[in-house]
Image (cartoon, grey):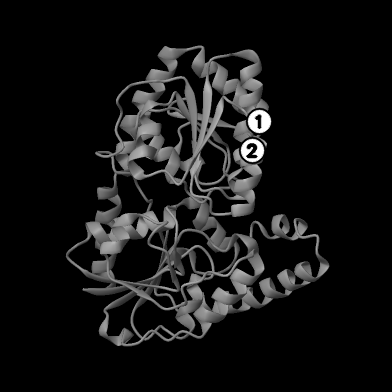
Amino acid sequence: MKIAIYHPWIRSKGGCERVILELVTRLKKHEWTIFTHYFEPNSTFPEYRKLKIVNLGKKIEPKGFLLRGLVFGINILSTKIENLENFDILLVSTSGIGELITLRNHEIPTICYCHTTLRAAHEFYEYYKTRMHDILKKIGFIFGVRIYRILEKIAWGKFKLVLCNSRNVKNRIINAGLFPIEKIVIVHPGVDIKKFKPNWKFEKYFYVPGRFKSYKRFELAIEAFKLFREKKKGCKLILAGYPDDKKYFLFIKEFVKNDKDIRIVESPSEEENIKLYKNCWAVIFTAKEEDWGLIPLEAMACGKPVIAVNEGGVKESVVNNKTGFLVKATPEKICEKMLLLTNNPPLTKKMGRMGRTYSAKFDWSVFIKKFENILREIK
């Protein structure tokens, strides 16, 4: 089949970009074309440079949360994809706002892969609103969300089928009243267990990977580590990821300034990232209400226990007290598990082995097989 994929932006090494990349490169029997309004090849996965990508927008990405949403929204609403009728399926990949492409592009069977509904318009609406101290920005935000919610429901009505990455996101879709429950299918993103594999080394550092955005809450891991260090010496903390939010990234850098026990790795290569997974003692995951979360799976595939906040999609992937710990999102609770693991190496290794075995259930081959069966039914 000839399949068109639309995703608003491909600019980082995030979960959305990873899912699209795995789908296109593993299902080679189909002819794929990726449409996007913003493509930055130097900051996303390098494999994208070899794929067929049509950039529908300008090179420059607008700065600022509200302005970026407004500009992208207008660009998407005004876009008509040329020769779309030459494709068999339009697959819309969205984490909010991407679905608006269907308002002018739905003449062929159109399905959705939902990474999440738009957080700012739904579950994080109050979170974002209370962080806006400028009255004009707050009014603009409230008005913009109201308009978006109207367009969002119309756009979702164009889908023939909706796939999503977790029960967590499925519930968000249902709670927002966007799509019938019987037409929503969960297809968990996975992990490459051949690439992410253990070397069974446990060096004395905790690893905190992820994009630098405020809701990833790196400061929570830092505060936990500082508490931990008061009780146990000789360990380090390594934070690594793409600086998606420059302001937040600078805040984190300032927060750990001159701390010799904490290191930040900006935009690590895949090889460097995997090495950091393989050699760490354990992985800490602090993201607020994560949609699904590939990081815990990658950690488990590398044979590492995961200390994760008991929120969102990670409750579906981390098996509490077996492959890791699900804890309350406080420095004290995270610190407690850090101490437990470092004081008990046999437990750390046992959890690592259980995590490795469990992660095999989410190998990308499982994801691809399920996706292919769905595409066959759509045709």
Pinpoint residue 130: horizontal percent, then vertical percent: 77, 57
Residue farthest along the left direction in this orientation: 29
Pinpoint residue 63: horizontal percent, then vertical percent: 60, 66
Q: Are marks 1 and 2 in contact (CB under 8 Å)?
A: yes
Q: Is residue 198 left or right of residue 163?
A: left
Q: Residues within 10 Å of mark 1 (few under 14, many from 20)?
A: some
Q: Residue at x 60, y 26 (%)?
A: 225
Residue farthest along the front direction in this orientation: 258
Pinpoint residue 223: horizontal percent, then vertical percent: 66, 30
Q: CA distance from mark 1 to mark 2?
A: 6 Å
Q: Quadrant of the C terminus?
A: bottom left
Name the element at disc 2. helix
Q: Amino acid at mark 2?
A: Glu
Kindly identify which residue carries mark 2.
219
Up/down of 53 relative to 16, above or below: below
The circle on residue 223 is: 1
Nearest the eye: 129 or 327:
129
**Residue 34's image quarter?**
bottom left
Nearest the eye: 22 or 121:
22
Q: Is residue 186 visible to the viewer in this orientation of the structure?
A: no
Q: Residue at x 51, y 71 (%)?
A: 60
Q: Is residue 23 left or right of residue 317?
A: left
